[in-house]
Amino acid sequence: MKKSTFPTPQDAEAAFYEALEAGELEAMMEVWAEDEEIVCVHPGGARLAGYDQVRESWAQIFASGQRLKVHVSNQVVLSGMMLAVHSVHENILVQGEPRSRPPVAATNVYLRTGNGWRMILHHGSPAPQTPRAPAESPKILH
């Protein structure tokens, strides 16, 4: 049984990024639902499904010893009674590197459970560095 209770999806998300920055596996897995239906996709990585695969992926990431500083920006939140979807940009600085890496576009989905809100999906993808201007459409006169 989980020790932590997250009263809101925002509380669960804050705990997720705190665990990511601290490199703490147990804290990270406190945020996730204990369910075989959870899904995680790291940037450029394969789709991982189920608690064991998700846990192992975070264990490997944290074993690298790299410490991250994550600034979340451009947050869009869609929230209902039982489900919340957060779309964010993760601006990541790896300690020891001179500058931030390109941002990651992440989608975090939280489910309201009997023990508070839990993450059921995290999907990160490289985000474009600058927004693309829409292509100008030809002007047609009728």
Image (cartoon, rainbow, N blue to C red):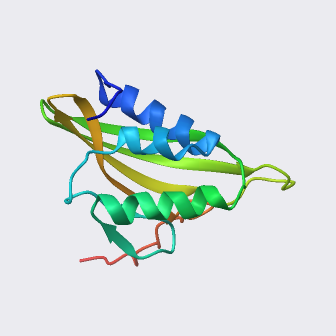
The answer to which image quadrant residue 5 occupies is: top left
- Of residues 102 and 21, the one nearer the viewer is 21
Image spot of residue 110 (x, y percent): 27, 41
Q: Find residue 114 and report its horizontal and vertical position in percent.
A: 14, 29
Where residue 22 sits in the image (x, y, percent)?
63, 39
Q: Position of residue 11 (x, y in %)?
A: 39, 26
Q: Residue at x 47, y 73 (%)?
A: 135
87 sits to left or right of 39:
right
Residue extending furthest toward the top: 7
Is residue 4 visible to the viewer in this orientation of the structure? yes
- Whether residue 109 sits left or right of residue 136 in the image: it is left
Q: Which quadrant of the view contains residue 18?
A: top right
Give the total number of marks visible in the rendering: 0
Locate the C terminus by quadrant: bottom left
111, above or below 36, in the image = above
| Residue found at x 21% / y 52% | 35
Q: Quadrant of the N terminus?
A: top left
Picture layout, residue 10 above or below residue 62: above
The residue drawn where x is 21% and y is 28% is: 115
